[in-house]
Image (spheres, rainbow, N blue to C red):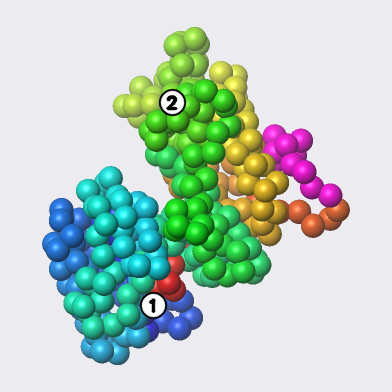
């Protein structure tokens, strides 16, 4: 048995994982502020999931943490996390002392990729990249069954490669990052701009009914035949295709998997993306990267953390 902990800015979720990578018990709490408080909550969650399964903490082999921010996995340290206000916090060591067992830590996006690779969409692949299209663009690279995170633990930040030189300003401060265009945030910006140009578009009606413009607005309009909505989807996916092709051309993974809120568009997302992606790819022969949708949702982080 192993424990996986997904540390988020809003919630901490923990699960007890068996040898077949099934979550047999789980629990969550609101994230408090401060390293000591967070570690205490993790300890409580660890006891909770063990209790649910009728086990003692001593029956568990090890634990893992998926944390936002820059992680030194080898030292077990959160080097920096803006969301948690962490600077060089030895989180894995702190929890290890509490639980009296080995604890590993990894970046949350990398950990989710590891979970998806071993227990989700990628479980039959030899290599995989997970791209999450949410508020930002995150990702994780799994090569040979292991996370690739660079020599300093900060590799795999796929959202911060440039797709437009000196383009839209990204939250990281650079202009033209993939995240500025392929995130749900970027999609909402494109949708709002199109609505200003086409006030009679179905997008205006949909956003009014929903009470806001969201990442779903243009997709919903496009599915109903709205020309302006369809144009937004096409523009947005052209940027998704650009970054996706960069990743495939660089690493040629067996599988590239999409997660995050935008991936809830389902097969329609892949169907619209594929023809835009084709001309961007450098592929020769019959072996080509398979595109797919993530299967595990929020469970990927818990399972991946347990496998660290």
* Front in this rendered view, residue 110 or 132: 110
Asked if residue 136 can be seen in this view, the reply is: yes
Residue in the image at 68% along x and 59% along y: 254
Quadrant (top left, top right, bottom left, bottom right) of the C terminus: bottom left
Q: Residue at x 45, y 83 (%)?
A: 19
Q: Give the total of numbered labels.
A: 2
Front-lying residue, 140 or 256: 140
> Where does label 2 land, which residue?
169
Q: Secondary structure at mark 2?
A: loop
Identify residue for label 1. Answer: 17
- In reply to whether residue 216 is colored magenta, the answer given is no
Would you identify the image quadrant in which residue 229 lies? top right
> What's the mark number on residue 41?
none
Residue at point 25% right, 76% down?
96
Residue 235 as seen in the image, left or right of residue 107: right
How busy is the neighbourhood of tag 1: few (under 14 within 10 Å), some, or many (20 plus)? many
Answer whether labels 1 and 2 touch (C-beta < 8 Å): no
For label 1, the SS is strand
Sequence-first tag of 1 and 2: 1
Q: Is residue 277 magenta?
A: yes
Q: Which residues are magenta?
A: 274-284
Q: Report the side of 2 relative to 191 (left or right).
A: left
């Amino acid at each position: 048995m192993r424990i996986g902990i997904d540390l988020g800015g809003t919630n901490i979720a923990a699960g007890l994982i068996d040898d077949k990578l099934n979550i047999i018990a789980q629990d969550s709490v609101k994230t408090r502020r401060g390293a000591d408080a967070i570690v205490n909550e993790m300890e409580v969650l660890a006891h909770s999931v063990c209790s649910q399964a009728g086990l003692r903490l001593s029956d568990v082999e090890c634990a893992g943490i998926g944390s936002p921010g820059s992680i030194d996995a080898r030292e077990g340290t959160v080097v920096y996390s803006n969301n948690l206000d962490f600077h060089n916090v030895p989180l894995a060591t702190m929890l290890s002392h509490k639980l009296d067992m080995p604890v590993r830590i990894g970046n949350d996006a990398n950990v989710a990729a590891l979970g998806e690779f071993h227990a989700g969409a990628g479980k039959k692949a030899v290599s995989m990249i997970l791209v999450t299209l949410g508020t930002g663009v995150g990702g994780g690279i799994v090569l040979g069954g292991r996370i690739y995170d660079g020599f300093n633990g900060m590799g795999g930040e796929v959202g911060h490669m440039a797709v437009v030189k000196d383009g839209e300003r990204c939250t990281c401060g650079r202009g033209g990052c993939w995240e500025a265009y392929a995130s749900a945030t970027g999609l909402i910006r494109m949708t709002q701009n199109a609505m200003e140009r086409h006030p009679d578009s179905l997008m205006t009606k949909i956003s009014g009914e929903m009470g806001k413009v969201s990442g779903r607005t243009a997709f919903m309009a496009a599915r109903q035949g709205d020309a302006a909505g369809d144009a937004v989807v096409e523009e947005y996916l052209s940027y998704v295709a650009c970054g996706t092709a960069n990743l495939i051309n660089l690493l040629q993974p067996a599988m590239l998997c999409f997660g995050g809120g935008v991936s809830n568009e389902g097969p329609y997302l892949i169907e619209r993306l594929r023809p835009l992606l084709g001309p961007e790819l450098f592929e020769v022969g019959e072996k080509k990267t398979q595109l797919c949708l993530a299967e595990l949702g929020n469970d990927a982080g818990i399972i991946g953390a347990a496998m660290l």
